[in-house]
Amino acid sequence: MKSTKVALSLIVFVLFIGCSESPNTDSVVQDTDASDTQFFGVAGYRVGPYGPNGAPVATGYLDYLQMLNERDGGINGVKLTWEECETEYNTSKGLECYERLKTRNPMGPTAIHPMSTGITYGLIDKVPVDQIPLITLGYGRTDASDGRVFPWVFPLLSNYWSLTSAIVRFIGKQEGGLDNLKGKKIVLLYHDSAYGKEPHQLLKAEAKNFSFDLSMIPVPHPGNEQQSQWLRIKKEKPDWVIVWGWGVSTATSIKTAKKVGFPREKMVGNWWSGAEVDTLAAGKGASEGYYAATLNLAGDHYPVIEDIKEHVYDKGNGGDESYIGTVLWNRGVAMAMLTTEAVRNAQAKYGNKPMSGRQVRWGIENLDLSQARLDSLGFGKMVPPIKVSCEDHEGSGLAGFQQWDGGKWVSVSDWIQGDSDLVRRQVEESAAKYAKEKNITPKCLGE
């Protein structure tokens, strides 16, 4: 995908922000009350300061569902329907969307992807009552990785503490080994929200383990003014800056780093601060050398994407074509694949019919996608293999790393595993505290 094409799409989107609608939902919204379909409630955001990042995710998600309908007739003969609700990345609006979507089909929504850590926290206590799985792929409440305490919540692929630990190991590798982190200065520049505070606990532990100096600097929502933060960074002269941003916040971090003369090759974003929309919005020449973690690889060469082009875009039913193959569009496609594979998994147990939320929950908790299965689905190495269990709702704990070369993201690592023992220990300790507060007896829910 050419960078100029993506940049033009971004400009057009920003100019018309607030007027965007999902381009491929109208044809199926009218059928969302059909009891013989598998209904997907989509809580996303295409407007506001985070819209340019949310739009490609939602588009990729819906494009994959549309492709399954067109190519396969749905899942084992069950057609897919959906409705999208705009949250604007706002917690109260997100909760309103959830209440709306859960009533739109007799079976309820297959699962909810809140696409916001704040909205996730607001739904934690609701989904067990409503029996609707909550999938928080690479975000949300990290200790929900312990499925014995949070049986309805799934931080699939990897959680924020695994990500944080992987980032430390990536930085250590760039420094010639983890032992060389001793005495280094690392700054966490974070979005001042529940999302931005998720890595604090784990990063403090890693700083103690490897004896590096840690500073944590908040950036107020939405993050489009960071002059004071970067003047502080310039004064402290850290060896590395970890960027934990979202939306306009990330591009502003990159632009301001250039302005104060901080090298972008000493910056590493998390996987929500590493998309084309971030690097291109920072301006020409601002992002070269910038690193970012990723849950999934970019590129449009995967067979599944060829199928989406053939069965959706060639028929005029797709979203914004310039999103195809970008980091966040591919992430939306991967989110849809994991959700639909959970449905397929549940059907293998309960029969080829629409699955309830409780049945889909079982399908997610028993998901096992090997590399061979990912290959057969056309994903190849876009995402890592994942195996979920009652105890482990995370599944892989892996992160990849990429670097911006001025026009595209280039993969610069294999999938990296952080300190899984440390992460798991902290997950269980935190989940146990939550269980005690809520009077929950940790157990496997089973069917």
Image: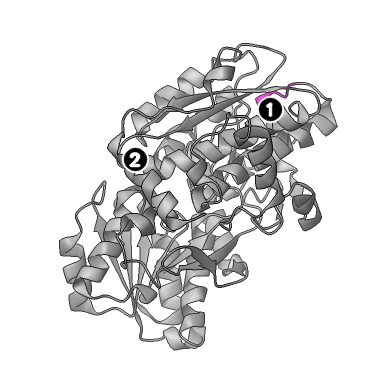
Q: Which residues are magenta?
A: 354-359
Mark closest to the chain's N terminus, 1 or 2 = 2
Q: Check the image and report above or below for 27 versus 149.
A: above
| Horizontal side of residue 392 vs 128, given as left or right | right
**Quarter of image, res 400:** bottom right
Return the x and y of residue 159 as percentages of the image width and height: 54, 54
Q: Which residue is mark 2?
A: 12
**Quarter of image, res 89:** top left
| Horizontal side of residue 231 vs 272, given as left or right | left
Tally of numbered discs: 2
| Horizontal side of residue 126 vs 9, given as left or right | right
Q: Which mark is residue 358?
A: 1
Q: Secondary structure beneath disc 2?
A: helix
What is the three-letter code of the residue carrying label 2? Answer: Val
| Residue at screen point 20% across, 75% down | 234
Q: Pick the residue in front: 52 or 159.
A: 52
| Residue at screen point 40% across, 73% down | 289
Camera sees residue 191: no
Return the x and y of residue 106 as percentages of the image width and height: 63, 13
Q: Check the image and report above or below for 383 versus 229.
A: above
Q: Secondary structure beneath disc 1?
A: helix
Q: Which mark is residue 76?
A: none
Q: Which quarter of the figure is the C terminus placed in?
A: top right
Return the x and y of residue 8 as percentages of the image width and height: 37, 47
> Label 2 crowding class (10 Å Cα cut-off): few <14, some 14-19, many 20+?
few
